[in-house]
Image (cartoon, helix red, strand yellow):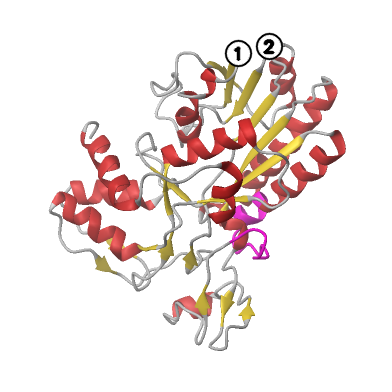
Amino acid sequence: MTTTCLVTGGAGFIGCALSRTLPDHFDRVVALDNMHPQIHDSAERPADLDERVELVVGDVTSAADWDALLADVRPTAIVHLAAETGTGQSLTEATRHASVNVVGTTEMLDALVRHEVRPDKIVLTSSRAVYGEGAWTDAEGAVTYPGQRSAAMLEAGQWDFPGLTATPFESSRVVPAPTSVYGSTKLAQEHILLAWCLAMQVTPVIYRLQNVYGPGQSLSNPYTGIVSFFAQRAKAGEVIPVYEDGDIIRDFVFIDDVASAVVQGLLHSGANRDAYDIGSGEGTSIMTLARTIAEIYGAPEPQVNGMFRNGDVRSASCDISAAEAALDWHPQVMVGEGVRRLCAWIDERV
């Protein structure tokens, strides 16, 4: 039987990284992408998209585009990457995020039904944003969920929750409680996909990705992450601005490690009700990241500016032990090395 892998959002950052290995495992690989200008500088085929991958320009929210695609493509596996990802942007463009992330998923599932296509497996890349602030512990070790930091807290410079300590996210233990529209749409996406797959006897595999970065990341999209933004500021000799007090924690996971995790799940994972948490397994403060990048370029010392974004969480890192065991996968590039690789890639282009 001919095997076909369909990758939605397949011409984007993660899709291009996957394109280097997926054709080694499938007879046919097709990328569906709307080539949105926020992600792509032009509507031309990305140079980083492997030539073995077929590119179909289409929108996941369009039933007509799905019908045209599935008239020719009958996927045996799907990697569902297509999404709007801006946490702050989702507060002011909620309909756009819900349309792509939620309705785009339901349009895909409805189209599969219309065309009587049942892939063996659907892999969804969800987000650590579904956790919100996650679980914190008090001095006695009791677990509590402090919820979203209020606008009043942030305006007063109260960044943390007094007396509480953040804990790493882990899907079997930490209850999701999104603090952003984006996170809410990704959690809805997870629930929709799980319900449909289990009813239709399709294997669902869900990933909750931490902050993905690395070569190939859009340098023009302001919502794709702070690593490339910091690097471009430092390369220009400018001061890197650091929000809150600099002690925001994030888990920065290198693009190659994300791609290898997705491939492992696509090829080897059974259904997982508990999402795989994919990160480096290490939390890094934003100030540490900024200083690392400033040192690479000899830029001025980063400066805390006390600014903040509503909906941002204070601490986001994850426990990857379950993913490592289930997928026989381990991150290979920690943040110090990964940042240097990204900066070298930027230097070749800017």
Q: Residue at x 53, y 74 (%)?
A: 151
Which dot marks residue 2?
Answer: 2
- Work out which quarter of the rendered image holds the N terminus and state it: top right
| Tag 1 near tag 2, CB within 8 Å | yes
User: Is 203 on the left or on the right of 47, as rendered?
Assistant: right
Residues in magenta? Answer: 170-186
The majority secondary structure of the magenta stretch comes to loop
Q: Is mark 1 on a helix, strand or loop?
A: loop
The three-letter code of the residue at mark 2 reads Thr
The part of the image, by quadrant, that contains residue 77 is top right
User: Does 180 sit above or below residue 126?
Assistant: below
Q: Position of residue 114 (x, y in %)?
A: 84, 23
Q: Which of 261 and 133 is in front in this view?
A: 261
Q: How crowded is mark 1: few (under 14 residues within 10 Å), some or many (20 or more)?
A: few
**Extreme residue toward the left, this view:** 298
SS at badge 2? loop
Q: Could you tell me which residue is drawn at 46 percent across and 28 percent down?
A: 16
Reading the image, the residue beneath label 1 is 27
In percent of width and height, residue 174 lies at: 64, 65
Q: Which sits in the foreground, 305 or 4? A: 4
Placement of the C terminus among the 4 image quadrants:
top left
How far apart are the alpha carbons under marks 1 and 2? 6 Å
199 or 82: nearer the viewer: 199
